Amino acid sequence: MVKPVLVIACGALAREINALKKTHGWEHLHMKCIDAKLHFRPEKIGAELRDRINRYRDDYEKIYVGYAECGTAGEIDKIIDEEGLERLPGAHCYQFFAGAERFNELADAEPGTFYLTDFLVRHFESLVVAALGIDKHPELRDAYFGNYRRVIYMAQTHDETLIAQAKKAADYLRLDYEYLFCGYGELESSLRKVAGGS
């Protein structure tokens, strides 16, 4: 019998992790999520992560952290070192979806790039427009995005509705639009190792 593994993950990855569980039959891979909105307050992610680790430590032989560095100024890495755990590779989800080499090439080619994932496309209005106050103060759009040149939609799935929404988001921000299918990238390969193959 395969022993259960717990992934403590950013809520922005819940849909993707569930899709991978279903695809690969990883019934023994369990998930507990932390609210994705904490990306606006990354200094709070560490405390939430510690809380989940302490809460579930005795229930699982293995715990994996479904976060990259995510702007926590090294706090996640400090926690995983102290706890003897591992996490997703890279600085953020854009890097592990695209792969480090490809992401670095994109960033070097145009530093003024705003990246979207499936999650961010679905929640663009609430997590970008409303959260930044652009809905109430439209002039903030240029203040926030005036130095950007393009939007790259790093898609996890082939979804025409999301593509249309991503184009609309780029138009709203008055930026050039590019589409890049990434699939699940290093999220999938990392979870495959954690889950034990298949």
Image (cartoon, helix red, strand yellow):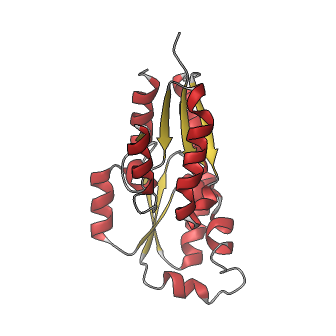
Residue 194 vs 65, above or below: the answer is: above
Asked if one can make out residue 73 in the rendered structure from this viewpoint, the answer is: yes
In front here: 42 or 157? 42
- Residue 8 x %, y %: 55, 40
Q: How many marks?
A: 0
Q: Residue furthest bottom?
A: 139
Residue 92 vs 173, above or below: the answer is: above
**Quarter assignment of residue 74:** bottom left
Position of residue 90 in the picture relative to residue 11 (left or right) = left
Q: Please report the residue visible at 39 percent of the width from the left and 35 percent of the height from the top.
A: 189
- Residue 28 x %, y %: 57, 22
Q: Please report the residue visible at 51 percent of the width from the left and 14 percent of the height from the top.
A: 2
In front here: 176 or 84? 84
**Quarter assignment of residue 29:** top right
Q: Residue furthest right?
A: 136
- Residue 182 x %, y %: 42, 48
**Quarter assignment of residue 183:** top left
Q: Please report the residue visible at 40 percent of the width from the left and 51 percent of the height from the top.
A: 78
Residue 146 vs 34, above or below: the answer is: below
Q: Please report the residue visible at 60 percent of the width from the left and 26 percent of the height from the top.
A: 59
Residue 93 vs 148, above or below: the answer is: above
- Residue 186 x %, y %: 39, 42
